[in-house]
Image: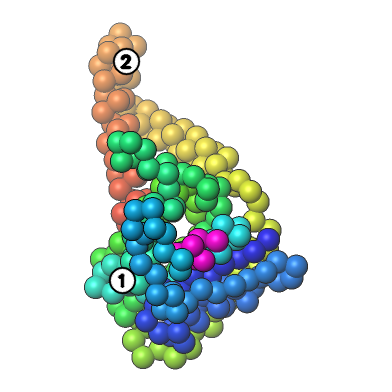
Amino acid sequence: MKVLGILGAHRRDGITEKMLETVLAGVKAPNETETIYLEDYPFKPDQGDQHDPVLDELEQKMLDSDVWVIAAPTYWGGLAGKMKDFFDCMRERLVRIDHLGGTHPDRFADKHYVSITDCYTSAFENWVTGVTDQSFRTIDKVMSAAGVIKLHELVLTNTYGMKALPENKKQTCLKWGQRLNSVKKRDDSTLKRYIELFFMIAFMALLTMGIQVGLKMLPTEHFWLSYLSFVVIFYVLLGFILHFFTVVKHRRR
């Protein structure tokens, strides 16, 4: 198995690179690693049938790899320009585009990726305002269109003037690098998500019925009233839970 690090930062030796290289340090033989520093590659978009040879080289490296570790800092609340430019130039190579302009997974389908970003803001500010959220969303959108499976994301905050990784973040990066040694060729989280969904719905149904009992809305002679109240209460609870997990709990720190 081969793990490919893709660094889209202005500095070769910055804190983003340190996170990337720490992840790759966790990958052990016989697995292989390689790092692409995008600043070293003067790529440009393809012009019709004339393919850019630099993109040809980068594309082949990606095809030859099983896992990508995509690392780029967050600037102004968005993904660093070098990485975004790379995604833009690779658009017609990453996906198959149909006659209506729709995108479909193609040659990169079922590969895996880990995403990395960092920012100057504090952990609390990033948790509250989601400074790095857009960077991850951009990476996820591109990878999802290409059919690449997400393994994890890593974020580092408060990086202004930082010269070395904090020990806790270093250990986290190493841990995820070690996990890349045994990546399976499928989405291992599917069954876990179904189990979590089952228990979430079961808990919500129980909670809804408890609320109905408290409001005395469960008399059998008023079936439709009980049904309507169940649906309304259930979906209100569902809205709160989805908001919590997608907006509040998922803030990156």
Task: Classify 10 Å Cα crowding around label 2: few (below 14), some (14-19), many (20 and above).
Answer: few
Residue furthest top as drawn: 221
Q: Residue at x 28, y 67 (%)?
A: 78
Compute the Cα span from label 1 to label 2.
61 Å
With 144 as the anchor, is 220 left or right in this view? left
User: Looking at numbered disc 2 in the image, what kind of residue is underneath it?
Assistant: Pro
Assess whether residue 58 is covered by the magenta stretch: yes
Query: Total of numbered circles in the picture?
Result: 2
Q: Residue at x 51, y 73 (%)?
A: 36
- The x and y percentages for residue 205 are 41, 30
Cβ atoms under marks 1 and 2 closer than 8 Å: no
Q: Which mark is residue 219?
A: 2
The majority secondary structure of the magenta stretch comes to helix
Residue furthest front as drawn: 50
User: Looking at numbered disc 1 in the image, what kind of residue is underneath it?
Assistant: Gly
User: In front: 177, or 244?
Assistant: 177
Locate the C terminus by quadrant: bottom left
Select label 1 or label 2 by which is in front.
1
Task: Classify 10 Å Cα crowding around label 1: few (below 14), some (14-19), many (20 and above).
Answer: some
- The x and y percentages for residue 133 are 32, 62
Assess whether residue 167 is covered by the magenta stretch: no
Residue designated by label 1: 81
Q: Residue at x 44, y 75 (%)?
A: 41
- Is residue 131 visible in the rendered image? The answer is no
Q: Where does the magenta region start and end?
A: 55-60
User: In the structure shown, which secondary structural element does the residue marked by tag 1 occupy?
Assistant: helix
